[in-house]
Amino acid sequence: MFKHLLTLILLTVSCVASAEICGKTDDRILSFDSKVGRLARDGETKGCAATLIGKTCVITSGNCIEKDTVEFNVPLSIAGVPQVSAPENRYAVIKSTIQTKSQGGIGDYWAVMRLAPNSVTGKMAGDVQGFYKVATHKYRDMEPVRVVQFTYALNDTEYVRDGVPARADGEVRHFAQQVSFGKLVKSGIFLLPEIIEHDADTSYGAAGSPVISEVTNEVLGINTHGGCQAEYVVKAGARYTNSGTSVVGSRGFSKAIESCLAEEAKEFAQ
């Protein structure tokens, strides 16, 4: 009963913001991580992040499953206009492989899917770009993390709150790959082990961005919700953090990951 009440509270507040800057400055910087791609509709340049965890398996947020292409090695934006990756860095999502939870609140948004071979090279994404290992145990609170993202960077709309000064490099970072650093503030809250909270800066477009341990380089979870500058009174124990879904805390997420990697291993063993 208590867990159900907590879930209802988080469902109520989860729609306030998708991502936010934590603190008084935007500390995101350019990043060039080949294992994290931009998930969008084919030909578009705004979407979510998707992270390789195998030759073909990627993880992202549950609200991103309508998108169909993951592109890696995304170029810098030009005068604020996001650019498309070269054809050899683009991989189509195999829609029939999607496993997802996309109807819950904080801690209940996740998706696992596989990518088809590249249409130009015939190679698998993980063989070319590399891939991350996912966490197999709960991490301690306050451990250092990073969040790799493809997010808004121009600092001139509602997506960045008042009081955050504009960055001079916003026009090249805009929906290109960026990274921010912070702490894993909380790994699981109360009776909700599937929730992770962190204080790394994010902005619009950070859904599905991997939360990666700076200690082990493992993916601990995915970013799904903002909250660092929340305007509501109670949010996840009154901590003003950005939030997401834990790999090990969410039983459904971890089982979907195991299933995807098992299918992948079986296919390539033949």
Image: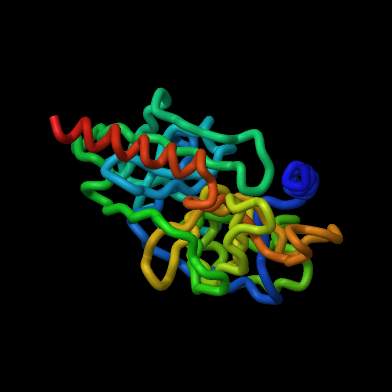
Within the image, what quadrant is residue 69 found in? Answer: top left
Residue at image coords 39%, 61%? 218
Hey, which residue is sitting farthest left in the picture? 270
Q: Vertical placement of 166 versus 63: above or below?
A: below
Left or right of 263, for residue 224: right
Front residue (pair 159, 154)? 159
The percent position of residue 67, horizontal first and vertical second, equals 50, 33
Residue 81 visible to an observer of this rendering: no
Left or right of 51, for residue 126: left
Left or right of 183, for residue 35: left
Residue at image coords 44%, 30%? 98
Hey, which residue is sitting farthest front in the picture? 1
Front residue (pair 206, 238)? 238
Residue at image coords 53%, 30%? 66
Hey, which residue is sitting farthest right in the picture? 233
Residue at image coords 78%, 61%? 230
Residue 110 visible to an observer of this rendering: yes
The percent position of residue 264, horizontal first and vertical second, equals 27, 35
Hey, which residue is sitting farthest top in the picture? 96
Within the image, what quadrant is residue 93 found in? Answer: top left
Front residue (pair 89, 223)? 223
The quarter of the image holding the N terminus is top right
Q: Vertical placement of 269 versus 78: above or below?
A: above
The quarter of the image holding the C terminus is top left
